[in-house]
Image (cartoon, rainbow, N blue to C red):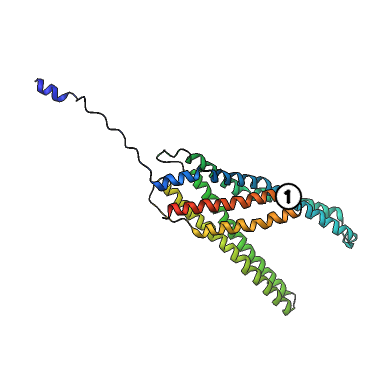
Amino acid sequence: MEDLQNNLMPSEDVRPEQPETKSLSSSAMSLRSLLSSGKMIAMIICLAVSVLLVPLGRSIQAKEGMQLAEDIIEESEFNSYYDMDQFYDILEKAQSESAGSYVFGSIPMIIAGVGFLILFLSSRNASTDRISTTGFTLLKVMNIIGIVGYSLIAVLVVFLSVLMIVIGFATGEAALGIVFLLVTGIFFLIFGAVLVLLIIKNVGLNSSIESLKAAINDDPPVKKVSGFSVVMLYIIGGLSAFTFISSLTAGNIPGALGSAATVGYYFLLGINLNIAKDIVNR
């Protein structure tokens, strides 16, 4: 009887099993370190400055353009044939609408900034098994908005090109129609090619986001980080430098600072994505 009781009593050496803590791979740790690094916070700061100052700079540029148009019209004979008060009302309305469009156009960048900030804060605790990927989701939403926007612009370009060709032939002058055809055809080819590259860039960024989203939590890999998108980010950053130079030359200080921040943002984003590519694609 005593043997039976002894067998039923739990042994002092028996302890409840502790849940195993998942050890992160070197790739996941490296990604978290990158997303919480100084380069990441510098990129977020550049993006915030760009979002704040670029619309202000463009608003100043639009106001100066409107003033220049008013000065030219006042010195011409145009004001003797038309009601100038009505014309000035149209200019003021166009200026206010353009300022609103600049603010509205900043929404995707604001979404991106919130996404990057969430990733930065989530990645600071690198010892956690899984971290929030909400930031990646916001970045993907921003890219989808960009793809839709570029596609709509492409449709608009096609429509305007066809409209110009029709107008050219509708004048009754075949030569004029041919000129319209050539001009619009060349314009469409160049602008259309740029739009296609931007769409491919955003599609590549979405693939990269899916890859990083899986790698940061050691989930099975789904896609590769796009090298083409990295190159496009560097190109966009380089082209933004021309806007900085033109704003600085015109004395538009907010526009110049905003453009400089835009250059920094795209180059830092390209650098960070290239480092992430080396980590994930190896």
User: Quick one: quadrant of the N terminus?
Assistant: top left
Q: Residue at x 67, y 70 (%)?
A: 184
* Residue 180 position within the rendered picture, expressed as x and y whole percent measured from the top left: 70, 73
**Residue for point 68% across, 68% down:** 163
Q: Residue at x 67, y 51 (%)?
A: 259
Q: Nearer the viewer, residue 155 or 61?
A: 61
Amino acid type for the residue under numbered disc 1: Ser
- Residue 159 relative to residue 2: left or right: right
Q: Report which quarter residue 198 is drawn in.
A: bottom right
The residue furthest left is: 1
Q: Position of residue 278 (x, y in %)?
A: 45, 54
Q: Residue furthest top?
A: 2
Residue 90 visible to an observer of this rendering = no
Q: Is residue 237 above or below residue 42?
A: below
- Residue annotated with mark 1: 59
Packing grade of label 1 (10 A; few <14, some 14-19, many >=20) is many
Residue 25 pos. (x, y %): 38, 46
